[in-house]
Image: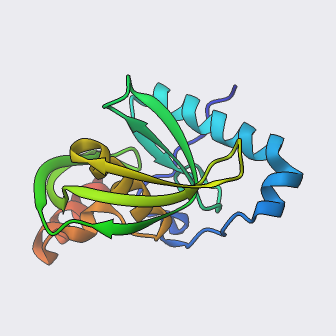
């Protein structure tokens, strides 16, 4: 497959809502969508990531890849993922992002979620429950598909500090 360029912080694509993928899109363009997904997996692996969303590689489709750390790091291709349940319990952990290299911050996320998505192979809608790190990965990637970056959860002061730091790197 091919390695794609990862879009970095500051590019407007990261703040642009991607297009949902219809079942007819999957039926007629399955090979194209699979090629995009497999290229995203290769890109994610080469960058040592555990998740990646299509906008991060400049593709405005509602598609992401998540790694399940509870199942031998199996990669799951999620089309049109939507979180349909969030527990009240939060956990805090350090997060980073392939689009914001070198920045790691503690983010509060829901400890347990349920996510609805379309499976690329069967075209069926699936519901997946996730907890802990796996729930965090899904939430992070679904946020990308909603034009939200992990640094958006930080205080305004912390965001300004990071933005200044990132602009110096460019």
Relative to 164, residue 129 above or below:
above
Scheme of colours in the image: rainbow
Q: Residue at x 12, y 73 (%)?
A: 155
Q: In the figure, is residue 126 to the left or right of 70?
A: right
Q: Does the image show residue 170? A: no
Residue at the farthest right position = 28
Q: Residue at x 45, y 29 (%)?
A: 74
Q: Position of residue 32 (x, y in %)?
A: 80, 44
Nearest the eye: 7 or 149:
149
Q: How many marks?
A: 0
Q: In the figure, is residue 137 to the left or right of 80?
A: left
Relative to 68, residue 167 above or below:
below
Q: Does the image show residue 33? A: yes
Q: In the figure, is residue 139 to the left or right of 90?
A: right
Residue at the farthest top position = 72
Nearest the eye: 92 or 129:
129
Q: Position of residue 103 (x, y in %)?
A: 23, 48
Q: Residue at x 32, y 31 (%)?
A: 69
Q: Position of residue 89 (x, y in %)?
A: 12, 63
Residue at the farthest bottom position = 156
Q: Residue at x 37, y 59 (%)?
A: 114
**For the N terminus, which image quadrant?**
top right
Q: Position of residue 135 (x, y in %)?
A: 30, 50
């Amino acid at each position: 497959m091919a390695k794609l360029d990862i879009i970095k912080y500051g590019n407007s694509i990261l703040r642009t809502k991607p297009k949902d993928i219809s079942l007819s899109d999957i039926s007629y363009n399955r090979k194209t969508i699979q090629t995009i997904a497999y290229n995203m997996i290769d890109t994610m692996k080469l960058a040592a990531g555990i998740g990646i969303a299509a906008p991060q590689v400049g593709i405005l489709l509602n598609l992401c890849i998540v790694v399940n750390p509870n199942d031998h790091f199996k990669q799951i291709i999620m089309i049109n993922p939507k979180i349909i349940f969030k527990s009240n319990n939060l956990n805090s952990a350090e997060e980073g992002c392939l689009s914001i290299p070198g920045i790691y911050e503690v983010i509060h996320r829901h400890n347990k979620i349920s996510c609805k998505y379309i499976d690329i192979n069967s075209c069926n809608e699936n519901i997946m429950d996730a907890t802990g790190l796996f729930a965090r990965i899904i939430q992070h990637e679904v946020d990308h598909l909603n034009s939200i970056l992990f640094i958006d959860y930080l205080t305004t002061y912390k965001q300004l500090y990071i933005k200044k730091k990132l602009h110096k790197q460019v």
